[in-house]
Image (tube, coloured by chain):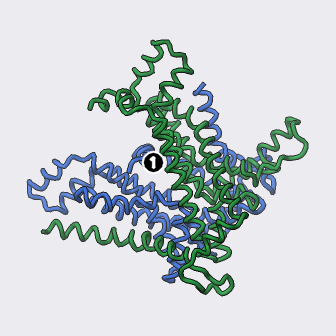
Chain colours: A green, B blue
Amino acid sequence: MNKIVQKVAVAAPVCAVFLLFFVLPVALMLSASFERIDTLTLEVVERFTFAQYFKFLTDSFYLRILLNTLWISAGTTLVSLLVGYPVALHMSRLEGLSRQIILIIVLSPLLISHAVLNFGWLIVLNSNGLVNSTLRSAGLIQTPLPLLHTALAVILGLVHSHLPFIVLPIENALRSVRPEVSRAAVSLGANSFRLFRYVTLPLSIKGIVTGSVIVFSLSASSFVIPVVLGGVRVRTMASVAFEEVMLNLNAPFAAAVSLLLLAMTTIAVAALGWIGRKLQPPALVQQAAKPASEGAA
Amino acid sequence: MTRAITYLVLAFILLPGVVLILTSFTEARFVSFPPEGFTFKWYVLAAQKPEFIASLKLSVIIASVVAAASTVLGTATSFLLRSLSPGLQAPLQALVMSPLVLPTVVIGISMIQFFTLIGLVASPVAVVIGHVIVTTPYVVRLVSDSLSALPRNLEWAGSSLGAPDWRVLVLVILPNIKVGLIGGGLFAFIMSFENVTLSAFLATPGLTTLPVLIFGYSDQALEPWLVAVCSVTVLLTTALVVLLERTIGLQRVFSAKG
């Protein structure tokens, strides 16, 4: 009896905090997205309407922003994969201090504020920044290239800050393949390309999917990086939602936009998961490739 | 081949931090690359800017309160998760971990609306609550990890020798999960200190944390004293990152499970 009282005494405040300050606000936001307010007086004029969703989905201006968000996040995911995979592969072969040092460097962008990293990229991409100065002193360009406020700058910033999320799961997947598997392939005559294409890559699909899902959803919902590196020219759904609630005080529209964003990422994540399952080698093969301690059923 | 690419990627990862540190010593009045000359004057100037000092103070206070609160809340949650039957464990786990799954914009917008509604807007309390919600899941992950590595026999030995529950907790359990507790608290501190996505929603004039201050300046001319501020935060975080890796191992914090 005493134990049950104890558990309830702990459970009550924990649940209360999360229900009151997390579940309730999200529920209120969901209901707010169905409201319509007078944009001047901010009074609610309609309680239940799909007006906010219609406004977004029927305006080509906003639809273009949706497409923009999609391709920026897809591009970020793809580039992160291409850049992160070799790092994961290299890390999975290392042990001890050298792996630890690489791990610290790979994880460091997560622990430095995005606001600070943005500042660094501004100095790199500015008209008198690192890239333009280097190109100019090499005589390759006369006038500075407009690198800032482009989709490319946004993707660069997003790849940089989300790389750890792709490297870690892939490295994890590669580490759980026993070394004998690659050795067997090589001794059977596979060259390094075929070893990668038919052995290493298929066995790391799980890590690739996990990483892609995280990078896609995080970069789709990031707004600090697009706002600074994309400026007014490159807008994403998250930055529109941010501006709507903070500058235009149109909370219902901001709520609807961010919920549409959530729906979009959920669909994309489901699609990625489906593709991943299609590409994955059969369960039996995966099981057999694991180290003896894990593989034995 | 993979080694060469890895080194290139590592250079890319380090680039913005290194560029910030290098340019913070420039003698030029406007930031440009390569930096000109060498001077510490921007650090001196930054230290004299009241807005910088105020936001640094606010950030440190908020991060400390958040670290303490989410360590207590997260540890309580971890104990609770361990003692519950699997049927109750799953929903509680889902509830506590969901802030990690939801996009930050969704959390940010829902919180600014909620705090406006209950009249707690423009208050540091709102920022603290918001940060606690997004940092607690990490603490739960780390402390649960430490707890699951602790054999139950130790507690049973303690109890069977006549120690009351609270003594078992203080003398047996807590010392053994010290690493998880310290790591969780430290990590919560860093996450709160560097947070800009959520703070940008909850901050108001007069309530600007350091990252929000920097974020607010990013669309203006780059001033060297701000670069000095950025470079200080880069160096500070680097020190904390090494400390974190030494105490708990960074990978455990970000591992996909949980």
Q: Give above or below for B117 relative to A177.
A: below
* Image quadrant assignment for residue B56: bottom right
Image position of B160 (left or right of B228): left
* Residue B193 percent across, percent down from the top left: 53, 60
Q: Give above or below for B166 relative to A95.
A: below
Q: Give above or below for B41 relative to A87.
A: below
Q: Report the residue at 64% width, 47% height from top.
A: B17
* Image quadrant assignment for residue B72: bottom left
Disc 1: which residue: B254
* Residue A3 percent across, percent down from the top left: 16, 65
Q: Report the residue at 41% width, 29% height from top.
A: A177
Pointer 1 chain: B
Q: Give above or below for A64 relative to B248.
A: below
* Residue A242 percent across, percent down from the top left: 63, 67
The foreground one among A113 and B40 is A113
* Image quadrant assignment for residue B91: bottom left
Tell me the quadrant of the picture where the N terminus of chain A can be found.
bottom left
- Furthest-left residue in view? B161
Q: What residue type is labelled 1?
A: Phe
Q: Report the residue at 61% width, 62% height from top.
A: B211
Q: Is mark 1 on a helix, strand or loop?
A: helix
The foreground one among A145 and A115 is A145
Q: How crowded is mark 1: few (under 14 residues within 10 Å), some or many (20 or more)?
A: some
Residue B146 seen in render: yes
The foreground one among A113 and B170 is A113
* Residue A257 percent across, percent down from the top left: 60, 67
The foreground one among A221 and A36 is A36
Tell me the quadrant of the picture where the C terminus of chain A can be found.
top left
Residue B47 seen in render: no
- Furthest-right residue in view? A142
